[in-house]
Image (cartoon, helix red, strand yellow):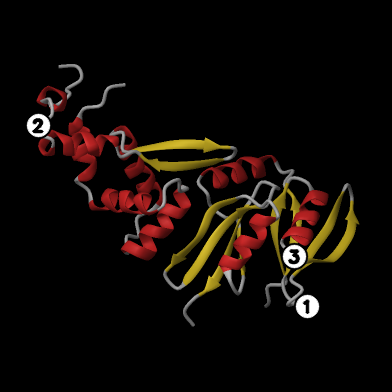
């Protein structure tokens, strides 16, 4: 068994695609119409055949309160690996991205937490010890 | 609301709450998530999120922590004023001592 697709719940798929590609730097992998929504995934350009991230509509009634509760406490919904948290932080801040946590050493990782504009917090993490 | 300094002593009596203040002193304006991660990674304090949240309530009742909502997020801020009043009680002996007596609301 392999993890091939994981998801974030987004409030608007078009807006999410723009943020996850133009700002974060992922690339679109699959875009198929499914009813009123899309099966819309992105991948990292570093691993184009790797795990896909599904930008999944958050229209289930429970999804919004779940997301709001996590956001209030600053809890990220997903974590992405980066080589250098500090430089990603500077790059993304330059693009207007809002961070709820600046780069911070947390034991074997350095992490930061950003707002994906679609209702989620996303952690970026850099392994600092092998 | 007038808070008694007794609340500050009680709030400071717990090592986890002192660690929370240490972390807020290092960086102000943190989410609950960041505080929990710092307690685990820097203080080896694996308190549950609910426990940390309750500690924050005690610190907030003592006036040592205030919270600020910004959009969907809630940030915790260290308010040093109760500590300054507490230190002033014994350190600023030349000051007017009347200012530094225990404030006992309701008595």
Q: How many marks?
A: 3
Say which label, 1 or 3, has the lower sequence index.
3
From the viewer's perspective, tell me whether residue A33 is left or right of residue A115: right
Disc 1: which chain?
A
Give a yes or no on whether discs 1 and 2 share a subunit: no
Taking the spot 66% from the left edge, 45% from the top edge, the residue there is A63
Closer to the camera in the image, B79 or A119:
B79
Q: In the picture provided, is B7 more to the left or to the right than B51?
A: left
Q: Which residue is identified by label 2?
A: B94
Q: Residue A66: where, in percent of width, then height?
A: 60, 45
Q: Chain of mark 2?
A: B
Considering the image in quadrants, where does the N terminus of chain B appear?
A: top left
* Both labels 2 and 3 in a single chain: no
Q: Nearer the viewer, mark 1 or mark 3?
A: 3
Checking the image for residue A49, the label placed there is 1
Residue B6 vertical placement versus B45 (above, below)? above
Which of B72/A93 is in front? Answer: A93
Label 1–label 2 contact, CB within 8 A? no
The residue tagged with tag 2: helix, strand or loop?
A: loop
Relative placement, left or right, of B107 versus A96 is left
Circle 1 crowding by C-alpha within 10 Å: few under 14, some 14–19, many from 20: few
x and y, in percent, of residue A16 in the image: 77, 52
| Quarter holding residue A88 | bottom right
Give the CA distance from mark 1 to mark 2: 73 Å
Q: Which residue is mark 3?
A: A25
In the picture, the disc for residue A82 is none
Residue in view at x 61 percent, y 40 percent: A65
Callout 3: residue from which chain?
A
> Considering the numbered disc 1 on the image, is that residue within a helix, a strand or a loop?
loop
Q: CA distance from mark 2 to mark 3?
A: 62 Å
What kind of element bears circle 3? Answer: loop
Horizontal and vertical percent for residue B34? 46, 54
């Amino acid at each position: 068994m392999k993890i091939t697709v994981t998801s974030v719940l987004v409030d608007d798929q078009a807006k999410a695609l723009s943020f996850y590609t133009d700002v974060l730097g992922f690339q679109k992998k699959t875009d198929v119409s499914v009813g009123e929504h899309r099966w819309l995934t992105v991948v990292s350009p570093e691993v184009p055949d790797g795990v896909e991230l599904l930008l999944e509509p958050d229209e289930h009634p429970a999804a919004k309160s779940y997301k709001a509760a996590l956001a209030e406490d600053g809890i990220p919904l997903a974590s992405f690996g980066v080589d250098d948290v500090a430089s990603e932080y500077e790059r993304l801040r330059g693009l207007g991205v809002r961070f709820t946590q600046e780069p911070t050493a947390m034991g074997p990782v350095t992490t930061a937490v950003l707002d994906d504009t679609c209702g989620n917090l996303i952690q970026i993490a850099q392994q600092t010890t092998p | 609301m007038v808070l008694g300094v007794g609340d500050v002593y009680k709030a400071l009596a717990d090592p986890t709450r002192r660690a929370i203040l240490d972390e807020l002193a290092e960086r102000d304006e943190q989410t609950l998530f960041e505080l929990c991660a710092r307690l685990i990674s820097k203080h080896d304090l694996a308190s549950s999120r609910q426990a940390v949240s309750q500690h924050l309530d005690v610190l907030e009742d003592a006036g040592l922590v205030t919270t600020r909502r910004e959009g969907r997020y809630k940030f915790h801020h260290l308010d040093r004023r109760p500590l300054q009043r507490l230190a002033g009680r014994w350190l600023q002996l030349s000051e007017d001592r009347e200012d530094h007596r225990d404030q006992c609301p309701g008595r």
